[in-house]
Amino acid sequence: MEHSVDSTVDQSDEPTMGGSQQAVADDNPVTMSRQLLEGVRREQPVTPHQNAIAALDEADLEPVRTDRATALAFWLNVYNASVQLLLEDRPELFESHRQFFGTDAVTVAGIDLSLDGIEHGILRGNRSKYGLGYLPRLTTTGLGAAYRLEVDPRVHFALNCGAASCPAVLAYEPATVDQTLDDATRSHLTQTVNYDETTGHVRVPRLCLWYLGDFSGPSGILSLLEEYGQLPAGASPPRRALRFDSYDWSKAPRKFADESRTELN
């Protein structure tokens, strides 16, 4: 997200994951990603979880390659956890978005991945972060094409890149990933969209412009706003009614939503 929900942070020291702060529950990739994210949120040691994800092999990642819900949950958790860790470990990189999003941030199955690699190479189906979402990405991740997902515009309201304008971090599970994405989308749009009944103008997040193609253009954005209750009943603003807000790139680490308190069993 290089372009240039109300959140609360729970910093309690209550035990999690069966009482061991560093235990890795099992070899399920999504469970590992949840443990990593939960450890980051609780400010606990996460090296065991990072090592476990790095040690995954092709067989372990089969559900991530073959099941959309599993892939979304895994990559969203890994991305959001990795952003927070990079902000903590190398905060100076955030001054250069190219460096921050382009540097290796996490190792998955022995492959070093940048935040750009996860977001644009995998979650956005290898689309470029330039060109308003209409251009293909010229490079690929080391994991290959098998991991690419079809673009789901809701991921833009689920990825937290560490900036003040980013949505809050939620945790994702395959069984509920679509509902949680709906919740994240509705929450962020409710806080950021402003419809002016007098002029018919609709102010929307800058992300909608940067990734216009992901939303299927202006008409797709308006349809999304209608779907998530951001336009009053009967409103029919023209395509040119969209106004894109500026983006606040101020560093804003640890923006976790209340819902991310859900613990792993």
Image (cartoon, rainbow, N blue to C red):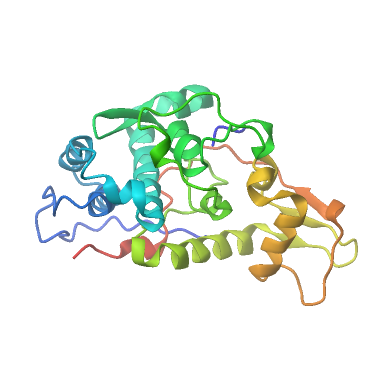
Quick one: 5 or 101, which is closer to the camera? 101
- Image coordinates of residue 13 in percent, x first then y, are 19, 57
Q: Residue at x 57, y 37 (%)?
A: 249
Report the quarter where the C terminus lies. Answer: bottom left
Say if 160 sits above or below 221 in the image.
above
Q: Is residue 20 left or right of residue 258?
A: left
Quick one: 251 or 105, which is closer to the camera? 105
Q: Is residue 236 left or right of residue 64?
A: right
Q: Residue at x 45, y 41 (%)?
A: 148
Residue 47 visible? The answer is yes
Q: Residue at x 67, y 62 (%)?
A: 224
Q: Residue furthest bottom?
A: 233
- Image coordinates of residue 96 in percent, x first then y, are 52, 23
Residue 96 visible? The answer is no
Q: Residue at x 46, y 68 (%)?
A: 179
Q: Is residue 238 left or right of residue 214?
A: right
Find residue 114 and report its image quarter.
Answer: top left
Say if 225 sits above or below 144 in the image.
below
Say if 105 sits above or below 170 in the image.
above
Q: Is residue 53 left or right of residue 252?
A: left
Quick one: 74 or 250, which is closer to the camera? 74
- Image coordinates of residue 209 in percent, x first then y, are 70, 43
- Image coordinates of residue 66 in percent, x first then y, are 35, 50
Report the quarter where the N terminus lies. Answer: top right
